[in-house]
Amino acid sequence: MVPSAYMQAMSAFVAQNMGAGRPDRAKKALIGAISTSLAVGVILSYFSFFHGGLLAQLFARDAAVIAAAAEYLKSYAVDCLLVSFLFCIIGYFNGCGRTAFVMIQGIAGAFLVRISVSWMMSRVQPVSLFGVGLATPASTVVQLLLCAGYFVWMHHREKKMPAVPFVVE
């Protein structure tokens, strides 16, 4: 929920700054948001990886369920770190009006990576929730690579094009 809140805040902040003709401020906000989101992500990752059983006990009493949840949370811990970057960048792109790219990379991550990796890991014996859970950070890595490439392309393209003032009618 924390990275999602950052994504929404980034989207609004970036849109305001792009509209005000201050893309430099939007880029600085992206760096600040990633830094603070990552700080929270480190804490959540630590608890998910090393104390997943404790977290699971908040919702279940069955020892088998707690053990399975703790195993899954170890793979989730990796994603806690990665989404600190991804969600802030997605918020940045949304604020820049690049929503089609956001949709495409999200669909690619979900359908081409997350589902495929989940299915493949469910075929590896012995099946483990840690292995199946690795599909989520694998998807996030692919989405981050797509976002990084798009970010570089977008800013390379901006350097070639003259600045057009934003006009509200």
Image: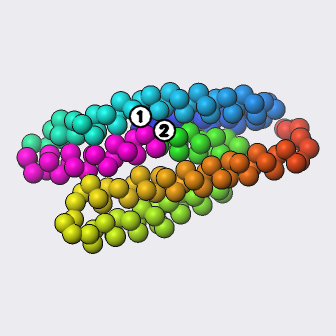
The residue shown at (42%, 29%) is 40
Give the extent of the magenta segment.
Answer: 62-82
Q: Please check the rendered image and state whether residue 67 is part of the magenta-colored stretch, yes or no.
A: yes
- In the foreground, 95 or 81: 81
On the rendered image, what quadrant is the N terminus found in?
top left
Spot occupied by residue 127 in the image (x, y as percentages of width and height) = 21, 65
Q: Can you identify the residue that label 2 sits on?
A: 84
In the rendered structure, find residue 41 and report the number of the disc placed on it. 1
Across and down, in percent, residue 102 comes to 61, 53
Q: Are marks 1 and 2 in contact (CB under 8 Å)?
A: yes
Q: Position of residue 159 (x, y in %)?
A: 85, 44
Nearer the observer, 126 or 39? 126
**SS type, badge 1:** helix
Q: CA distance from mark 1 to mark 2?
A: 6 Å
Q: Position of residue 17 (x, y in %)?
A: 73, 31
Residue type highlighted by circle 2:
Ser
